[in-house]
Amino acid sequence: MQDMATGDDPSSRSVSVREISDALLQLIATFDQVDGAPRGFGTEAPLSHLDIHLLQHVADRPQDNASAIAQKFGVTRGAVSQHVAWLRSEGLLEPADQPSRGRSLKLVLTGSGRRAVEEHERLHERYSVLAGNLLLAASADEKKRLLEFLKGFDEGMSRLGEKEGL
């Protein structure tokens, strides 16, 4: 199909690395804005990105303590404790049992917490459907190369962040 303004075939146009990089950075910014915005996930509480992922983590790995959760999310145990206290006050988490001396408190989701996690999983399913629809025409090899590119970009960004002290 020809571009009406230029008469060029857009599929024959060379794409620069800068255009790809800029498009990827714009995607990251858009995703951060959409996914990072606090939302209720079927509850009254405005849950931050960390809040909903903390709930998801408790659902998936109820045996983990605050130290393991903090390490997973790259935050301090104090930050995890603050979020847990807030999530408990909102009725989304509750203690699984009373800790004995020296034992850490284990947490479980309440009914509202389970509802939030289910809504969060539905959101991620919508992301998967969107990606799947965009990749319908891609070959298995193209999908593999795209995944390798994305993983490589993620690793490179992580290394860049470490060099910058982030």
Image: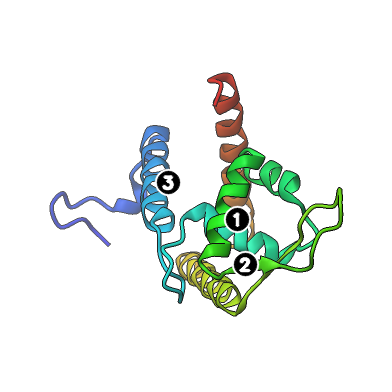
Q: Between tags 3 and 1, which lies in front?
A: 1
Q: Are marks 1 and 2 in contact (CB under 8 Å)?
A: yes
Q: Name the quarter where the N terminus is drawn.
A: bottom left
- The amino acid type of the residue labelled 2 equals Leu
Q: Which residue is under mark 2?
A: 93
Residue nearest the viewer, comparing 27 with 56: 56
> Which mark identifies residue 84?
1
Residue nearest the viewer, comparing 71 with 146: 71
Residue at image location 35% in from the left, 53% down from the top: 11
Q: How is the image coloured?
A: rainbow
Query: On the image, which quarter does residue 149 sit in?
Result: top right
> Which mark identifies residue 28?
3
Cα distance between the residues tagged 3 and 1: 28 Å
Left or right: where 76 falls relative to 103: left
Residue at image location 43% in from the left, 57% down from the top: 35
Residue at image location 86% in from the left, 48% down from the top: 102
Q: Position of residue 129 (x, y in %)?
A: 50, 72
Q: Is residue 10 above or below residue 118?
A: above
- Element type where label 2 sits in the image: strand
- Element type where label 3 sits in the image: helix
Q: Is residue 74 above or below residue 132?
A: above
Q: Position of residue 22 (x, y in %)?
A: 36, 38
